[in-house]
Amino acid sequence: MKKNVSAALLGCGLALSLTAGNGLFSAGVAYADAVEPGKEEVEPALGGISIPLNHYAASRIDPEGELAELLRSGMWFRKAEEVQTEPETVPEQTATEPETEPPTTASAYASVAIARVDAYVNIRDQANTGGNVLGKIYNNCAATILDTVDGEDGKWYYIRSGSVSGYIKANYFVTGEEAEAIARQVGTVIAKTNTGALRLREQPSTSAGVITMLALGEEYVVQEEGIINEEGKEFVKINLDGDTLGYVSRDYVDLRVDFAQAVSVEEERAMLEEQARREQEAEEARRRLEEERQQTTEAPVQTSAPTEAPVQTQAPTAAPTQAPTSAPGSDYEYNPGTGTVREALVAYAKQFLGNPYVWGGVSLTDGADCSGYVLAVYRDIAGISLPHYSGSQANCGVRISADQLQPGDLVFYASGGTINHVAMYIGGGQVIHASSPTHGIMISNMNYRTPCAYVSLLN
């Protein structure tokens, strides 16, 4: 099988979004770089409570109503204070030991369990190993504990994770402070842009250089949040793809925390069936491509010109709005290539969705970076050798315009004027690429960041 199925299931993309508004685990509080010059920054009304909200939501079965009531009554801040650590110094008047023990506050993660297993553990419909398997929960996945019961060989949890609710033996999970510590490591903070044409800056300042523009509704992995610059403005550091890092003003991104979660038996079956379908499509596309190549090789060579010019039965298609030009240092001549080879390139590329990103890698199963991924796909399907560097790949083939893009063409992105990322166009305004260590090989909107060049290699 071409696909790394174990990796796909471990990071199957079914993220557990910690959002107070939907009854799951998260708080997305909208807070960034003004698009209009001179526009004043607006101080967020809920600044600084994003993480407490996440913790509060994670510790409640149905946090939405409670949060709404707390915020309406102004009691949230008092509630948040209850879980603060003790101060570094103790006032003199309270230095003596109190006569009674102060009430303890339960951990914000008291009802959250993090799976600690070698691979996965089954979720069952009964608190014993004879129960029917409803799904699987993998290592470091999160679940909400709905109940604790006595079951086979001791304590069991009745949990909910993703679309699965069922029983799991308690010793496969950690909770409380230990769960919180692990959650901070395995949870992924995601920034979603809430405005278009958002500037990604080189530094956390509205006067810093612009790396690229981000589109509305795109999501990026957060490297660091709560960055306050000298002007008192808050910024977030994000990972665009690979090693492209930059800063966006907090006002224009919504933050949430995602955790991997359990998969049901039906979901796992659907993922395996989808992977099998992709592999079958890729195999069929390659078969058609081989047949086309064989027919071309066996076609008789015409040794004399036809006695009569063929009759034009259809008007020629309109000329492209921008003539393609050879890339610098390239000897390619533009030819759109056949639909068959393009179909084969896209189908082959898709069967590796979800496989890992590895900097410097060229393995479609064990890991590749952006240029290594493109290199391997073109090598295997089109027999084209490419350099292992996106900037060099941009100098192969011919430059085309955005409206000339066809599936299989390459789209390039730059940081500071230097090309540093490449993706393959698959049609419908989308690209497939080896994105980052967090996302691996994935499909994105072509304008998730501003493209700087388009290249066709099919000559």
Image (cartoon, rainbow, N blue to C red):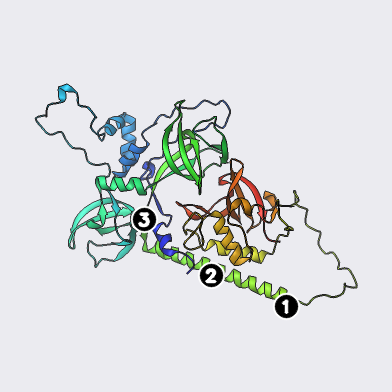
Query: Can you see residue 111?
Result: no
Q: Earlier in the sequence, mark 2 or mark 3?
A: 3
Give the amino acid type for the residue marked by disc 1 in the picture: Glu
Query: Can you see residue 170?
Result: yes
Give the amino acid type for the residue marked by disc 3 in the picture: Ser
Q: Which mark is residue 280?
A: 2
Q: Which residue is mark 3?
A: 163
Considering every residue shown, the one lying at the far right of the view is 307
- x then y, percent, for residue 206: 53, 30
Q: Earlier in the sequence, mark 3 or mark 1?
A: 3
| C-alpha distance separating marks 2 and 1 | 27 Å
Give SS at disc 1. Answer: helix
- x then y, percent, for residue 308: 90, 71
User: Quick one: quadrant of the C terminus?
Assistant: bottom right
Quick check: marks 3 and 1 in contact, CB under 8 Å?
Answer: no
The label nearer to you, 2 versus 1, is 1
Looking at the image, residue 125 sits to the left or right of residue 33; the answer is: left
The label nearer to you, 2 versus 3, is 2
| C-alpha distance separating marks 3 and 1 | 55 Å
| C-alpha distance separating marks 2 and 3 | 29 Å
Q: Which mark is residue 298?
A: 1
Q: Earlier in the sequence, mark 2 or mark 1?
A: 2
Looking at the image, residue 319 sits to the left or right of residue 448; the answer is: right
Give the amino acid type for the residue marked by disc 2 in the picture: Gln
- x then y, percent, for residue 98: 11, 29
- x then y, percent, for residue 250: 46, 34
| Quadrant of residue 333 within the rendered picture | bottom right
Give SS at disc 2. Answer: helix
